[in-house]
Image (cartoon, helix red, strand yellow):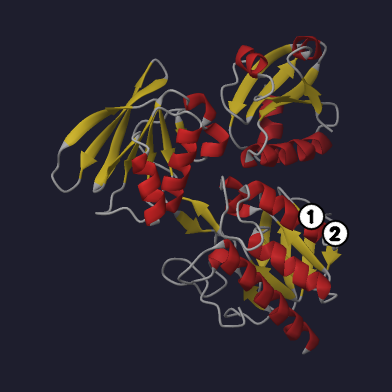
Amino acid sequence: MKPEHHCDCLILGGGPAGLTAAIYAARAKLSAVILESNITGGLVNSTYIVENFPSYPSIHGMELMRRMRAHVDGLGVPVEEVCAVERLDLAGKVKTAETDEAVYRAPAVILATGRKPVALETPTECDQVHHCAICDGAPYAGKRVLVAGGGNSAFDESLYLLSLGVAHVTLIEVMPRFFAAAAAQEALFASGKAQGHTETRLVDLEVTGGRLTAALLENTATGETWREPVDGVFAFLGQIPNNALFAEQIELTKAGYIPAAVDMATSLPGVFAAGDIVDKPFRQITTAVADGTVAALSAERFLRGR
Amino acid sequence: MLQEMTQADYRDVLAATQAGVCIVFKDLCPHCANMEKVLEKFGRLQPGAVLLGLDIQKNPDAAAALGAERAPTLLIIRNGAIIRKKTGLLNPKELLALYQEA
């Protein structure tokens, strides 16, 4: 029999939205618990440098989230990390989340499960395909890498790879243009160590003796294919919403995001949403923090008004 | 909770380990931080297992000697020898299964 815990507000997800919601919940004297499937911090943990979070002109993503987590810990909110939620029931007045270790019940829930990176799929698999430059970039000093993706992550991480001593970056984007900020594009191509190809897709990988030797690329507009010698591939192909736990229980958009009201209320009473899982035009740390604030204050209002 | 090894002592520590898991990690690597939490949970499920750590940046030669090129890499140890290697993320149940199958 798993132990049962009762609280005012369950927070699913420990990224910027979930952590901020916990801070506001604690300040409102609500008992809250954060359930996080990995470690707190979310996608920000994989961001090399954050330069648009007020009060920190430039800070490592993991360091920023460590500080946010310390704030939550200081307020005494329990955080369950590496926590597998096996069952989530959002119907009724008391919501239930059953994890691998315990059962949690609360009248209010904040869904802040965020998004996860899209995995690179190729016919040939190899160990030299990565999704985190911070984690896996160092061994590629002096070598050539392919970066798949044309958004801010792809360009920022390419710059980081060059700072590690990577000799050359080939960047590919399937769309007709790159979508990263102009400053990041200028900085990367001004390095003289990067080449970009739009309307280009990765067809396959060439592996010899267990090591990646080349990427096979195709220009989707002309049909031209070529072999690009590379030692590693880094994929930054965007993200998809983490909605598997509640996709059958709550209204979602076609793309899988939660259409939240201005007070972050969802289609179910007592269930609020915050952060990247919400259907919205801009997904930034600051907008996630704002959502977490509103969701927690709305949860408080909901609980006091019952 | 993790016993951190160094370039100087890793051979002796491994040789003295009857049964355990070593994580080759890197500071400011989110997946490594994740796996350290997984190891904590694994330690509760398998209290007899020795939990070791090796910082790949501080001890690159030791990591290379152990065949760990990337972080996080998990090494399963039996009777002082590495009998299994696994790179990337696992959940506690998957790690327990890997440990018990090895």
Amino acid type, label 2? Gly
| Residue that mark 2 sits on | A74
- Whether pointer 2 and pointer 1 mark residues with C-beta atoms closer than 8 Å, the reply is yes
Amino acid type, label 1? Ala
- Above or below residue A237? Residue B95 is above
Report x, y in % for residue A159: 45, 41
Neighbourhood count class around disc 2 (C-alpha, 10 Å): few under 14, some 14–19, many 20 upward: few
Report x, y in % for residue A26: 82, 70
* Residue A40 in sight in this render: no
Task: Tell me the subunit letter for badge 1.
Answer: A
Mark 2, secondary structure of its residue: helix
A258 with respect to B99 (left or right): left
A157 with respect to A27 (left or right): left
| Residue that mark 1 sits on | A70
Image quarter of the N terminus of chain B? top right
Which of A65/A275 is in front? A65
Res. A15 image quadrant: bottom right
Task: Tell me the subunit letter for badge 2.
Answer: A
Which of A170/B3 is in front? A170
